[in-house]
Image (spheres, helix red, strand yellow):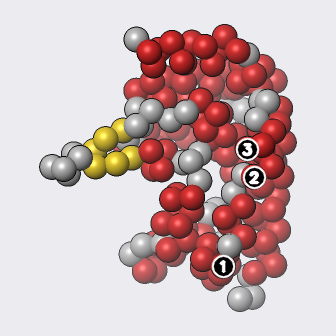
Amino acid sequence: MKYAWKHFKTITKHKLIVGRECVACGQFRLGLLHDLSKYSPTEFLSSARYFQGDRSPIEKEKAAKGYSLAWQHHKGHNPHHWEYWIDYDSSGGIIMNRIPYKYVVEMVCDWIGAGMVYSSEKWTQSEPLAYYRKVRHGRHIHPDSDFLIELFLRCLDEYGLDCFHRMARDKSTLQMYEEKYND
């Protein structure tokens, strides 16, 4: 457990950045509660064991064991992860449920926070969109949620954090997302 303190500092820094971003987006409660499960024994002990410092320990644990108990716990307790919204029908087909607006906002804030922590001073406002476009093909995200994610990330990429914050707080963006769902 020689990395426990370093892991604690890393996840706390991430939590504080995501919290700040969520508050700037009008999601005060989500900012306060973001990623509390990372401090649970199931997630903390495993992640401290596989700590790397420059990226999430989840991938290292998966490489070593073929799975990550910390990740299984985390994605099942945190609705800001797209995997939380996946289900299967009786024939094994994937059901992509629409992610509620507030959790899409928190998801984008999470990606911003992860980038800022792991990329540090190299982080740019273009990083989250580039990341999403790189990994999107392997994800099962409801088309409406994908549209909103892309909209937020393009705003961030082209105009910066303040634009993303304003757009996330803007009731017309929420209304557009809700109306799209009701079509």
Q: Give the number of the disc on residue 33.
A: 2
| Residue 116 in sight in this render | no
Q: Residue at x 77, y 65 (%)?
A: 10
- Real-space Cα distance between discs 2 and 1? 17 Å
Q: Is residue 181 above or below residue 19?
A: above
Apparent side of residue 30 relative to residue 49 in the rendered image (left or right): right
**Quarter of the image that includes the N terminus:** bottom right
Q: Nearer the viewer, residue 12 or 75?
A: 75
Q: Residues within 10 Å of mark 2 (few under 14, many from 20)?
A: few
Residue ID at (83%, 32%)? 24
Residue 30 - label:
3
Q: Position of residue 43 (x, y in %)?
A: 62, 72
Say if 140 sits above or below 142 in the image. Answer: below
Dots 2, 3 in contact, CB < 8 A:
yes
Question: Which corner quadrant of the image does residue 28 belong to?
Answer: top right
| Badge 3 density bin: few <14, some 14–19, many ≥20, Cα 10 Å | some
In the rendered structure, are the residues bearing label 3 and label 1 in contact, judged by CB atoms less than 8 Å apart?
no
The three-letter amino acid code for the residue at tag 3 is: Leu
Amino acid found under the numbered disc labelled 1: Pro
* SS under mark 3: helix
Which numbered disc flags the more N-terminal residue, 3 or 1? Answer: 3
Would you call the spot at circle 1 few (<14 residues within 10 Å), some (14-19), or many (20 or more)?
few
Asked if the residue under mark 1 is in contact with the one under mark 2, i.e. CB atoms within 8 Å, the reply is no
**Disc 2 marks which amino acid?**
Leu
**Name of the residue lying farthest toward the bottom:** 1
Instruction: Give the left or right position of residue 158, taking residue 19 as reference.
Output: left
Is residue 92 in view from this perspective?
yes
As drawn, the label of residue 41 is 1
Across and down, in percent, residue 168 comes to 71, 24
Using the image, determine if residue 180 lies above or below residue 20.
Answer: above
Identify the residue at the far left of this view: 91
